[in-house]
Amino acid sequence: MPVPCRAGCGKNAMLKRPKTGDALCKECFFWAFETEIHFTITKGKLFKKGDSVAVAASGGKDSTVLAHVLKTLNERYNYGLNLMLLSIDEGITGYRDDSLETVKQNRDDYEMSLKILSYKELYGWTMDEIVAQIGRKNNCTFCGVFRRQALDRGAAMLNVKCIATGHNADDIAETVLMNVLRGDIARLKRCTAISTGSEGTIPRVKPLKYTYEKEIVMYAHYKRLVYFSTECVFAPNAYRGHARALLKDMEKIRPTCIMDIIYSGETMEVKEAVSLPSQRVCIRCNFVSSQEVCKACVLLEGLNKGLPKLGIGKSSKAKRMLEEYNAKQNKSLEEAINNINEEYEKNNCISKGKVCRSSCKSKQTAQINKTHKTTSETCCNGQSDEKLNTDNDITNSKVKVLLKEYGLSEATQDDSSNLISEKIDHSNTEKVANATNDDDFEVDSHNTDEQIVDEDDTCGGACGKIDSLHISF
Amino acid sequence: MICRKCSGPGSLIIRKEYCYCNDCFITNINHKFRACIGKNKILSPNEKVLICLSGDASSTVLLDLIHVGLSLNNHKKLRVIPYFLHIIERDSEGEEISKVIVEQCKNYNFNITLVNIDEYFNKNILCNDNTMKNHYQPSISKNILLNIPTSISEDVLTKMKQNIFIKIAKQLKCRIVFTAETTTLLATRLLSNIAIGRGSQVENDIGFADKREENVKILRPMREITNEEIDHYLRIKELNPATDILGKGYGTSLQSVIRNFVLDLQENYPATVSTICKTADKIGSVTDNVNKKKCIICQSNLDCNQLNLTAVDATMFSRKVSSKVINSNENLKHIEEGNNLMFPFIYEKLCYCCSRNISQLNDPMLQTLVCRNDDK
C-alpha cells in the first residue's frame, strides 16, 4: 500500500527517513535534504560571504553530493562562495585512478576548478609502493596521515579560507566509537567538532555532519549524480572496520543511534586533569601537528630509511628503532670518513687550485639545493634526500651519505677538528645537516636566497681556511 | 604453567597470558576488591552500606568477597555494616532468582531485603512490610517496559533500579551503596551510554562512584575485575550464581549488540575492555552546571543548550522540514521555531536520553513517569 508523503504534498512517499522515521516523496526529500544542510551551514556559521572554499573531492558519494549541494545552495541562498575542487591522488591502482576520473567529471558538471595533488609528488611514494613496503596491515595509517597533510598543502596552494570535507553523520559516529575503543582521548575530543582548525591553520568544515549516509546515497541515486562507489582496495583490514560493523548493527536496531552518538560526543568533555597534547606546528614541515615532529614526517622518514614501521605504535618503540638504525649507520659513517680521508690526502698532494675547484663544486651543490627548494617549496627532508640521491654525481652521493649521518649524530658534527669539515665547505655541511635535521627546511624563496649568498661568502672563507691550514702544516 | 606470584604450579591463565595458582588468584581478586574501596577513601569505619545483589555471577562474587572481608580478624577486616537488597524483576523467573539469593545469604548468615520493581512508583517502599505478592497495584513497570523497544527498556530498567537503590538506602540511612558491575560490564555500558546519547553522564554511570545523589553514593568496588576472573572465582570457590552471567537479554537491543561486539573484540584484542574503561575515567561533561538543573528521571545534570548547533537542533530541524508543507524559502525562519515533539521536556526537566525515551511512550505513561518523580 502506498504511503502518502508526510509533508502533505499529496504524492506518495518514496522513502522513509532514518533520522526521524518520516516518509517523504522524492521532491520533498530533496528539499528537506538540502534545507538541512543549509541549516547546518548557517547555524554552524561554517562560511563567510565571499570565502574561497576547497571541496575535498574523492569522487565518492559523499564528496560528490557535497559538491553538488554546495553549488546548489550557493546559488539558491546566495552564499557568495567561490567553490573549487581539491583532490588527492594517493596512487592506488584500481581505486584512485578510476575515482579521479569521476572527480574530473564533477569538475565539468559543476563548473568548478580542480586541483589534484599526488602523494608521489608530495612525498615521493605512492600508496601502492607504501603497501609493498609495509604490507596489508597499518597502511591506512599512512594514507590517512598523508592525506590530511596533503589537503592542507593543497588548500594553501589554492589560497582558500577553508576546506569542506564530505564527512557524514555515520563517519562521525563511527569515529567516536573507534576513538573510545582505542582510548584515543585527544581525538575523541575533537572528532565531533563541526569545524576544526587552530590559529594559523586552514579550518576544515563538515557540512554533512548531520546527514545520514543512507540519505546521501539516496540523494545521489535519485539525482543521478555520477559518483565512484568502489571501496578502497586496502581498506578491509583497517581497525575502523570494527567500529563500522558495530555501528551498522546498531543502526539496524535503532536508526537514531547515529545522532545519539554524535550528541554524546558533543556533550562529552575530557576532564581537566587529563593532559592532552596541544596542537602546534611541525618543526620540519610547518604543518599542523600535535608533536614536535608531525606524524607525516615520521612516517616518511621511516619509509625513506627502510623502517616502514617507524611511525606505527608507541613513540618509545620508534625511538628504539631509530637508535638501532643509527648504530648501524654509524659504522658506515666511519667507512665514509675513511674514504673521504683518502681522497683528501690525494687532493692534498695537488695544488691549491684543486682545492678551489672542490669549493666550486660545493657551490654547485648549493645551487642544486636551491632548485630543489624552489621546485618543491615545502618538501620534507626525506624527499630532498632522495632527489639528491638520484640527480647528483658521485661526489654528491658521498656528501649525501655524510649529510645523512650528520643529521643523526651530533657528536660528529661538533667535532670541528675532523677533516671532513675541512674537505667539504663548512657552512654547506652545516646547512645540509640542518636540512637533514629539518630544523628550518620549510623555506620561502626569499630566505633561500639569503642562505645562498651566505654560502658564497663562507665558501671563500673556507678556501682560505684550508689554505691557511696548509701553511701551518 | 608456573604461578607468576608464588612460582608454584599454576592452575589457570588470565587473558591468555598470566598464569596463577588458585590461592594466589583468590588473594589477588580479594586484593583488587579491597584496593578499589581503599584507595578511594570514601568509606568511614562502620559505615552502613547497602549491597545490591542482582543474582548474576558478579553479584554472587561480591557477596562472597564481602563475607570474606567481614570474617577476617586482623587489621584488614572490612569495617562496614552491610544491608543486602535484591530487586525482583518483571519476568517469571524473578521469583525463582530471589529464592536462590535468599538461600545464598542464609548460608552466609546475612539478611536480605527483597523489593519488587513495581515498588518504583511507591513512595515508602519498606513500609509495606515486604510482602509484595498480594500487592494491589497493577504492574505499571511491566506495562511500560513491555511496550517500548528493548533498547530503551534496558536503559529504563537500569535507571529504575538505581532510583530504588537510592530510595531504600535513604530509608535505611545508608550513605553508601555497593553494586557489582565488573570491568567487562562497565565497558559495554560505556559504549551503550554513548550509543543512546548519555555521553555526558559517563563519569557517573561508569566511574567508581556515582555521585548524582547528594547524600547517597553508589560505588562499584568490582570495577577492576573482569568477567573472566569472575568465572574462575566461581569455579574455584564452587559458587553457583542465581542467574547467568550477563543478565538475561530481552531480545535484540543496542545493548546486546554492543555486549556481543565487546566480547568478540576482547577475544582478539585482550586489552579492549580495560582500554575502554580507562577511557571512561578521563571523560567528563561539557555541562558547566550553572543552573544545577537535574533530569527528573536519571538525576543527571542537564546539558545546557549552550552549544551553537547540536544533534538535538539538527534532529528537530529534520523533523520540521519533513513534516510541514512549506516548499518555499521564506518560511525557513518559521520552521526554526515551533513546538518540540521529538524531545519533550529537554533542557527543562529531562536529559537528552530520558527525553528520547519518554517520546517513545504513549501519553498516560509519560505523565505517570514524569509526574511521579517530579514531586519527590
Image (cartoon, coloured by chain):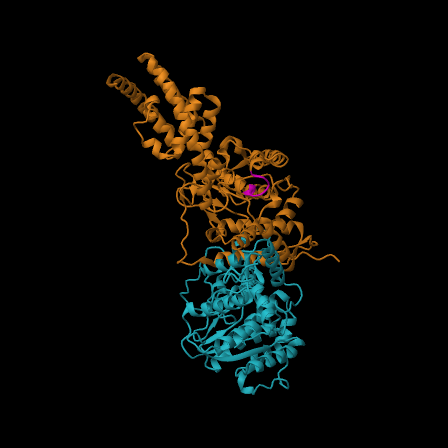
Chain colours: A orange, B cyan
Residue A360 location, quadrant: top left
Q: Is residue A138 magenta?
A: yes
Q: Is residue B231 above or below residue A1?
A: below
Position in image of residue A33 (x %, y %): 59, 50
Q: Nearer the viewer, residue B180 or A39?
A: B180
- Residue A301 appears in the figure: yes
Please give the name of the residue rendered at 26% of the width and 18% of the height, measured from the top-left corner.
A473
Between A54 and A353, the one lying in front of the other is A353
Q: Tell me residue A125's x, y (percent).
A: 53, 32
Residue B31 at x, y percent in the picture: 48, 68
Residue at the far left in the pictured view: A472
Q: Is residue A271 above or below residue B364?
A: above
Q: Is residue A277 above or below residue B57?
A: above
| Residue A58 image-quadrant placement | top right
Closer-to-camera residue (B331/A179): A179
Q: Residue at x 47, y 26 (%)?
A: A387
| Residue range highlighted in magenta | A134-140
- A212 magenta-colored: no
- Taking depth in this image into account, of A156 and B150 the one nearest to the observer is B150
Residue B329 seen by the camera: no
Q: Quadrant of the N terminus of chain B?
A: bottom right
* Image location (x, y in percent) of residue B170: 47, 80
Q: Residue furthest front?
A: B8
Question: Does A184 sit above or below residue B182?
Answer: above
